[in-house]
Amino acid sequence: MAYLNVGGIGMLFGPAVQVALDEFPHLEALRLVAAYGDAEVRRVEAPAGGWTADTLTRELDAGRHYADSFAPVNAFVGQHWLGSTEV
């Protein structure tokens, strides 16, 4: 299992937990949601060509202050969970 932190959002990669762009609707919005109260604290619409690892990384890095200010925060693309400030 490998750990990656992008923009304050921790993500686990490995046989049991794996984030793959082809496994979720990559044309849906990136959402940062506060874990307490489920308030959406940041929403970024998908680029015209859909999300790639690079565009997701850039947007998570750009929104780092949201993750820090509203932690704990979960990151989603559509309803697909990407990671959390608590991972």
Image (cartoon, helix red, strand yellow):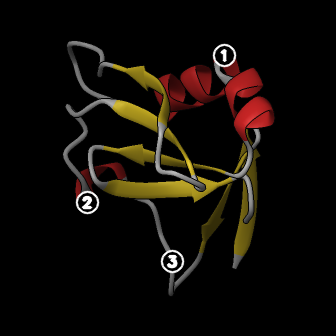
Cα separation, mark 1 vs mark 3, equals 25 Å
- Which residue lies at the image location 30% right of the left edge and 19% below the top edge? 45
The spot of residue 46 in percent (x, y) is 29, 22
Residue 36 located left or right of residue 56: right
Which quadrant of the rendered structure holds the C terminus?
Answer: bottom right
- Which residue lies at the image location 57% right of the left edge and 57% below the top edge? 83
Label 2 CA crowd tier, 10 Å (few <14, some 14–19, many 20+): few
Residue, disc 3: 17
Under mark 2, the amino acid is Glu
Label 3 CA crowd tier, 10 Å (few <14, some 14–19, many 20+): few
- Helix, strand, or loop for circle 1? helix
The spot of residue 86 in percent (x, y) is 74, 62
Quadrant in the picture for residue 71: top right
Under mark 3, the amino acid is Val
Residue, disc 1: 62
Q: Which of 51 and 32 lies nearest the eye of the viewer?
A: 32
Residue 24 located left or right of residue 38: left
Say whether disc 2 or disc 1 marks the residue closer to the N-terminus: 2
Cα separation, mark 3 vs mark 2, equals 12 Å
> In the figure, 1 relative to 31: above or below?
below
Residue 45 located left or right of residue 52: left
Say whether disc 3 or disc 2 marks the residue closer to the N-terminus: 3
Looking at the image, do the residues carrying marks 3 and 2 touch, with CB atoms under 8 Å apart? no
> In the figure, 4 relative to 48: above or below?
below
> In the figure, 7 relative to 74: above or below?
above
